[in-house]
DNA sequence: AGCAGCATTGCAACCGGTTGCAAGAAATCT
DNA sequence: AGATTTCTTGCAACCGGTTGCAATGCTGCT
């Protein structure tokens, strides 16, 4: 069938070990044998079988990439970056889609059977307990886009959702909105809870600003639209902080469908800065998650754990940034003191 | 480190073969040994190492999933469905991102090293030659979303782009548009070429309809928008068939930004029916690709090749469907004869 | 009881590699 | 040149499983 070590060894007239060594970084082979072997390998089109070697080396270079966010446009970027960065480092992503089941046990079993070197859990909606199952199995794990906690039990890298809530609130206040709303995702998602907490941290300190909060049933267009339509039936706030960009677009759609306009009638600020947010016909003001850095950092962490499995759990936070576009009214002109 | 066959064998007081056999479908083991082994395995938390067994069985249950479409929202659905369907059949997707390089050689090498059982190339922009590299290496391969040809050299499943072009043309004609345009993706993409061919097949037969064609530099929002802005500077057609939904949304954005409206001033019909197309604030009339069926069929094909590697190459076509939404003017009322 | 026939089991070889070890070859030193 | 050190190399065992084969145990039959 396929060309093996033995075939190359025979053709080159050397032992199997010699062939193995020519293909092993830093092993002791003379230039003469190396050349013979390389010639034979080239002739035969030999490539070492990564799986067979993993048996003795204990390294597969496979990284489990687990996610349940297959409906959020941001995650197309996320997958793109993850797969590219992993590839660039000689690692291969083994993708696990958690859409059906949130049971870590199955995916753990699966990834153990394939002896992945490490696991990246890429999800903002999975609880911090999820990655712990991998940790207990001694599999290096990083929770990417996970919830920040001060003393994490497993590595987590992401943003500070509480701080994002604060940023959103400050942004709305600075623009002079007097009645504002929080439109979150699912009530029990940690990201929703944290973003809301930060939002009310700041709003609560403002006596002249009133705030409401409501929750969409999912981080989806439909849920955002439905929730906003409901809000529009009552007296809506002047501006909303939506817990996510897709939610925001749903809300914007509801606003437009009701014959209103953003930002003139109602302001909206999202979170994520997904690719579509910058599209001119959406033009969403939002809070950008530094996706690129989160991903690079996650991969750094997981690879560093390959060398040092006992590495102490760490939480890495990245700052977010307000991206000014067209769905919030502009800042009032600064008063020139004189 | 991890629990192996030997550990279980020792604890159960049987040979390693006995353990192996209890975990092999259809092997001969007495109920008594099976029970002993299962008990021991449970106690120890044993799971067979899939990679080790692949050495002797020649099956890894790994399927290479290769794509270069990490910027098209449709592909988030595609990845979702592929990963789920593969998982449901006990197969694991090994994802390869071709964004950087279109060189099949590297990915071929990589996937061979991991002895994948089969490969699915999921891309509408890669040439039919690409999958052939895998075929030559005797790796079962299916080109999903690939170009239809009558005597394919490798399995291909997708839609008939020529027919889609025809459908688009007929749809525009039926709505009474007299000047229409084809707004394609990259000039040399096979999908663009075919869609254009079909479109002009039908339009060319109509004497009273005039048609133009132009090409965006990529299947992207920006490219679609840029191209439409350019078209709007001259005298634009009454309606456009855009080679893709993202392109369509870009075009729609350009139309709106120019103070025009769809469908009142200019009609647009897309292709794909990505998730966002149905969003109320986009509401794109488009041609739906039966993504679900294409994917299921692709997996069927690739798995059937595992059993019969010599299976004759086959092209599977799925019919597309016009999805009526709000970016084309309605059909004129049928005349009631009487 | 004796025997044929089938099911179960362990041995040992194998899958495609890696690696510790000792022996032989080459290089360096005195 | 001879002694010593360092490089190379092949042998053989091993990684965690699978599987053909022959030996054994069990069943049912006459």
Image (cartoon, coloured by chain):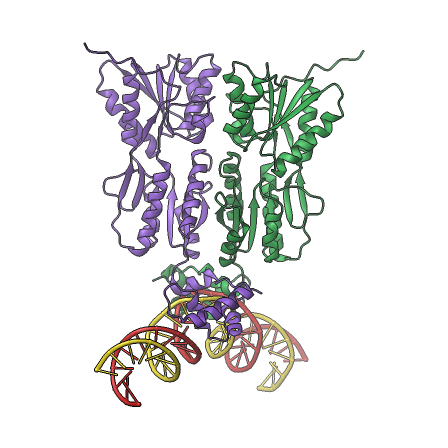
Chain colours: A purple, B green, C yellow, D red
Residue B84 in the image: above or below residue B262:
below
Question: What's the residue at 49%, 69% (across, down)?
Answer: A5
| Residue A120, horizontal then vertical, whole percent | 38, 46
Question: What's the residue at 36%, 65% (across, down)?
Answer: A26
Question: What's the residue at 27%, 17% (across, down)?
Answer: A174
Q: Is residue B312 visible?
A: yes
Relative to residue A120, is residue D20 drawn left or right? right
| Residue B329, horizontal then vertical, whole percent | 63, 17
**Residue extending furthest toward the right:** B338
Question: What's the residue at 46%, 59% (across, down)?
Answer: B50
Residue B61 in the image: above or below residue B22:
above
| Residue A235, horizontal then vertical, whole percent | 37, 12
Q: Is residue A145 visible?
A: no
Relative to residue B102, is residue B321 drawn left or right? right
Specify the quadrant that holds the N terminus of chain B: bottom left
Residue D25 in the image: above or below residue A278:
below
**Residue extending furthest toward the left:** A338
Specify the quadrant that holds the C terminus of chain B: top right
The mark tally for this picture is 0
| Residue B66, horizontal then vertical, whole percent | 53, 47
Q: Quadrant of residue D7?
A: bottom left
Which residue is more in the foreground, B10 or A293?
Answer: A293
Residue B174 in the image: above or below residue C16:
above
Relative to residue B252, is residue A272 drawn left or right? left
């Amino acid at each position: 069938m396929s060309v093996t070590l033995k075939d190359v060894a025979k053709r080159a007239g050397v032992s199997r070990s010699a062939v193995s060594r020519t293909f092993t970084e830093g092993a002791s082979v003379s230039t003469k044998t190396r050349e013979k072997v390389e010639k034979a390998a080239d002739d035969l089109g030999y490539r070492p079988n990564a799986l067979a070697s993993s048996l003795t080396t204990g390294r597969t270079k496979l990284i489990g990439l687990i996610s349940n966010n297959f409906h959020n446009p941001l995650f197309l970027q996320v997958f793109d970056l993850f797969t590219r960065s992993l590839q660039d480092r000689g690692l291969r992503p083994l993708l696990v889609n958690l859409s059906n089941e949130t049971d870590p046990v199955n995916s753990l079993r699966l990834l153990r059977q394939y002896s992945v070197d490490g696991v990246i859990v890429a999800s903002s909606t999975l609880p911090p307990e999820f990655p712990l199952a991998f940790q207990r199995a001694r599999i290096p794990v990083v929770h990417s886009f996970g919830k920040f906690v001060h003393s994490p039990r497993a590595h987590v890298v992401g943003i500070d959702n509480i701080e994002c809530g604060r940023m959103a609130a400050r942004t709305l206040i600075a623009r002079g909105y007097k009645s504002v709303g929080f439109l979150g995702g699912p009530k029990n998602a940690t990201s929703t809870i944290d973003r809301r907490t930060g939002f009310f941290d700041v709003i609560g300190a403002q006596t002249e600003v009133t705030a409401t909060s409501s929750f969409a049933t999912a981080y989806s267009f439909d849920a955002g639209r439905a929730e906003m339509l409901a809000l529009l039936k009552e007296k809506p706030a002047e501006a909303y902080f939506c817990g996510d960009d897709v939610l925001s677009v749903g809300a914007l759609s509801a606003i437009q469908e009701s014959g209103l306009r953003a930002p003139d009638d109602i302001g909206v600020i999202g979170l994520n800065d997904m690719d579509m947010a910058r599209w001119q016909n959406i033009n969403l003001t939002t809070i950008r998650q530094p996706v690129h850095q989160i991903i690079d950092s996650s991969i750094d962490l997981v690879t560093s754990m390959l060398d040092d499995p006992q590495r102490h759990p760490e939480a890495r936070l990245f700052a977010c940034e307000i991206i000014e576009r067209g769905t919030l009214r502009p800042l009032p002109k600064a008063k020139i003191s004189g």
